[in-house]
Amino acid sequence: MPVPVHPAAVVLAGGEGRRFGGDKIIALVDGKTSLERVVEAAWAAGASPILVAARDGERCRRYMGITGLDLICLDDPPGTCGGPGAALLAAAEAAMEYSLDRLVVVPGDSPWLEPRVVEALDAALGLAEAAAILHGDGFLESLLQAHRGEALAAKLCPLRGLCGLRGELRASDPLRLARSLALIGSGEAAASATSYAHINTREALRTRAPKNPLGEGIHILPPWRPRPRPGVPVAWLCGELAREQRYYEDLGIRHLARQAGRDRQLICGEAAGPGT
């Protein structure tokens, strides 16, 4: 069977926009909605089909009318928990339902996203089963990631397990579960840091200022790295989380080290300081 030429794109559009004071996905940016601009960036990068993960079908169909495109609408799967990573369950289900070979997940509130970022994430799937953007301060652009479809679909059960374990999903969870992970320096994938700016507030829409400095290089994290695994004895899991936290601290990936530390604190009652 030939390898599909194009990746799918999943646009995350389920945020409530509380800080923005309304639906930020349809906020106008230089005459177009943020959603339109993000979809256009994905199309320009060759992504097809385009899927939109929203909280309900009606809202997603409204987005279809705005873009004028025949988008595939994804509702949040029934019984999901909350948290910023909840919509990624919809992406994992889509990977399985539509037999997607590769998919790039993009936030709908990043209206200045450059197509080359989508292209870089997709290209990195030739090196690892998942890919993400890493900033110069050790933090990820966590809602912007790429996955091999079969590998993401296989994470459905572990993601639901994490959801039940702590009552929420984080955007970094599919990345921490990946057997191999490519981290692309944000400066390698975009000409301008503004490409990563989000419109979480109306002030952010005005300033177009990114939160993080650009990163350099490409880091490939190998299959043997520690990973969170629900459904195992707590003592064993706590040991794994400590090793995971230390692993990311040694690499300077502060974002994932902090996530492992939060899990140690929540699940193990341990201080979220350096791994032991």
Image: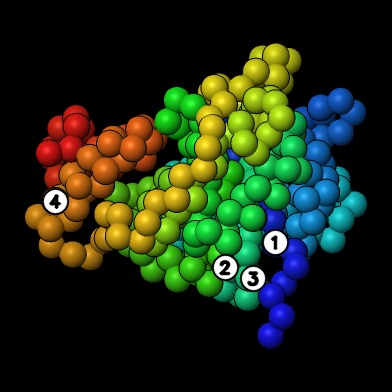
- Mark 4 surroundings within 10 Å by alpha-carbon count, few (fewer than 14), some (14 through 19), many (20 or more): some
At 53% across and 59% down in the image, what residue appears? Answer: 127
In contact (CB < 8 Å): disc 3 and disc 1: yes
Q: Quadrant of the N terminus?
A: bottom right
- Circle nearer the N terminus (4, 3): 3
- Circle nearer the N terminus (1, 2): 1
Q: How many marks?
A: 4
In contact (CB < 8 Å): disc 2 and disc 3: yes
At 30% across and 60% down in the image, what residue appears? Answer: 224
Give the Cα distance between marks 4 and 3.
Answer: 35 Å
Q: Which residue is mark 2?
A: 149
**Under tag 2, what secondary structure?**
helix
At 45% across and 25% down in the image, what residue appears? Answer: 137
Most foreground residue, 5 or 60 = 5
- Circle nearer the N terminus (3, 1): 1
Give the Cα distance between marks 4 and 2.
Answer: 30 Å
Q: Is residue 84 visible?
A: yes
- Mark 1 surroundings within 10 Å by alpha-carbon count, few (fewer than 14), some (14 through 19), many (20 or more): many
**Under tag 3, what secondary structure?**
loop
Q: Which residue is mark 1?
A: 8
* Residue type at numbered disc 2: Gly
* Residue type at numbered disc 3: Leu
